[in-house]
């Protein structure tokens, strides 16, 4: 019944949430983290049903009662249940604005009208405008009675620390289908050369350069895209300066969020390569390899590397990802990580 679909794609998450439901131990607020956004939305609906179903089981909602059907309804987006409210980035600006969070906060303060609990879901919570985030933080600090807050994010590190710390984090696994991104190919080539280079500073700096060029181009592309969508120049002569300023702030936040997302995605493709090397070292099934077209080169790398080294390399990239999420100096962190990957410095050096 309920949770079945989620269990198929995210078995660990489904098990954790169902256990909390069965033990009546749901947290006030959850942060769903990972890049499988569809799975996270599914999990949010399952939780909303579990707390509002008219004939709930220990496993969750019944999927058949009026409440469950209203929550599962696809029109309007977010369903038809009066106590379950969804907000997500507005289509044009791709930012969640304060008006949206205010409206959600207002409904959360009211008593449930049909179900037992008010549920507020924020999809792509990392897109909260700073004003909206600050205002929502107050709700998190003093959650209304009988309310459940669910934040969904593929880039949870971009949320305010204070928001992150007030939510119980649930990590989702990778989305099922993944394909190498063509634009990342030069980075992947560079990393392969670096790993096969036996401690070459030159190769580390070559990859560093490739990375900088890639990131600069991404930033420019994103800025152009955001500017084009906003078409601010059309209003520059006539619009209220305050409105313009607000718009520009929003655009800046959008560019920064998208840039971070793309940077993290590029690093993730490199992590997949390191993971492939490990799979080959372990003699794993060829079907587990992500970069199948590079099978021979990968196997060659694997024979030249120890298991410890391969694990340390993955750790190096994970450390880099979490450092970048915390806003450290990008160039410096990247340089240190690449030198470490070249095998020149100890992989476990202090961060
Ligand atoms: Zn039901």
Image (spheres, rainbow, N blue to C red):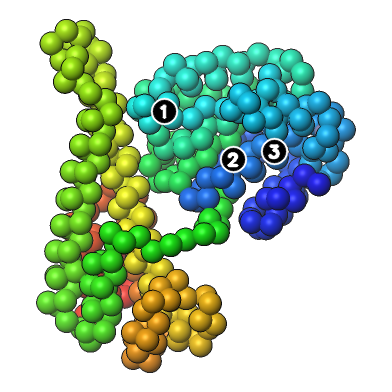
- Left/right placement of residue 149 relative to residue 234 reads right
Query: Callout 3: 10 Å neighbours few (<14), some, many (20+)?
Result: many
Label 3 or label 1, whichever lies nearer to me, is 1
* Residue 351, image x, y percentages: 29, 63
Mark 3 to mark 1 CA distance (whole Å): 26 Å
Give the camera-side residue of 230 and 326: 230
* Residue 80, image x, y percentages: 68, 22
Q: Are marks 1 and 2 in contact (CB under 8 Å)?
A: no
Give the camera-side residue of 323 and 232: 232
Q: Residue at 39% x, 76% y: name it.
A: 293
- Residue 91 marker: 1
- Left/right placement of residue 141 relative to residue 223 reads right
Q: Which residue is mark 2?
A: 41
- Left/right placement of residue 129 relative to residue 70 reads left
Q: Residue at 23% x, 67% y: name it.
A: 186
Label 1 or label 2, whichever lies nearer to me, is 1
Give the camera-side residue of 11 and 20: 11
Q: Secondary structure at mark 1?
A: loop
Ligand 1 has an atom within 8 Å of the beta carbon of the residue at disc 3: no
Whether 299 is drawn above or below 59: the answer is below
Q: Secondary structure at mark 3?
A: helix
* Residue 294, image x, y percentages: 36, 79
Q: Is residue 337 visible?
A: no
Q: Are marks 3 and 1 in contact (CB under 8 Å)?
A: no
- Left/right placement of residue 150 relative to residue 247 reads right
Whether 39 is drawn above or below 202: the answer is above
* Residue 131, image x, y percentages: 37, 23
Whereabouts is ligand 1, in terms of quadrant? top right
Labels 1 and 2: the sequence-earlier one: 2
């Amino acid at each position: 019944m309920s949770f079945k679909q989620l269990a198929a794609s995210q078995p660990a998450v489904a098990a954790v949430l169902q256990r909390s439901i069965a033990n009546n131990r749901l947290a006030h607020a959850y942060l769903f983290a990972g890049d499988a956004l569809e799975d996270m939305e599914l999990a949010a609906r399952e939780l909303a049903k579990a707390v509002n179903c008219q004939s709930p089981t220990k496993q969750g909602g019944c999927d058949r009662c009026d409440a469950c059907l209203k929550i599962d309804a696809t029109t309007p987006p977010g369903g038809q249940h009066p106590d379950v409210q969804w907000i997500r980035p507005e289509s044009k600006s791709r930012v969640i604005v304060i008006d949206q969070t205010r409206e959600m906060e207002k409904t959360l303060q009211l008593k449930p009208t049909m179900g037992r609990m008010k549920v507020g879901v924020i999809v792509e919570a990392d897109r909260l405008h700073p004003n909206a985030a600050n205002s929502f933080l107050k709700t998190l600090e003093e959650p209304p009675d009988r309310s459940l807050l669910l934040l969904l994010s593929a880039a949870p590190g971009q949320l305010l620390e204070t928001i992150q710390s007030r939510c119980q984090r649930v990590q989702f696994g990778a989305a099922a289908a993944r394909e190498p991104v063509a634009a990342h190919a030069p980075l992947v080539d560079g990393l392969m050369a670096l790993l096969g280079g036996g401690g070459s500073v030159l190769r580390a700096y070559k990859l560093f350069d490739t990375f900088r060029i890639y990131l600069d181009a991404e930033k420019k592309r994103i800025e152009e895209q955001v500017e084009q969508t906003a078409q601010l120049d059309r209003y520059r002569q006539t619009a209220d300066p305050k409105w313009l300023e607000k718009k520009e702030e929003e655009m800046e936040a959008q560019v920064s969020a998208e840039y971070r997302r793309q940077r993290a995605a590029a690093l993730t493709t490199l992590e997949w390569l390191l993971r492939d090397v490990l799979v080959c070292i372990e003699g794993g099934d060829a079907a587990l390899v992500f970069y199948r077209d590079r099978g021979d080169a990968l196997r060659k790398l694997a024979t030249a590397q120890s298991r410890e080294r391969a694990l340390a390399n993955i750790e190096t990239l994970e450390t880099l990802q979490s450092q970048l999420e915390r806003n450290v100096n990008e160039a410096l962190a990247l340089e240190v990580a690449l030198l470490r990957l070249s095998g020149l410095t100890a992989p476990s050096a202090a961060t």
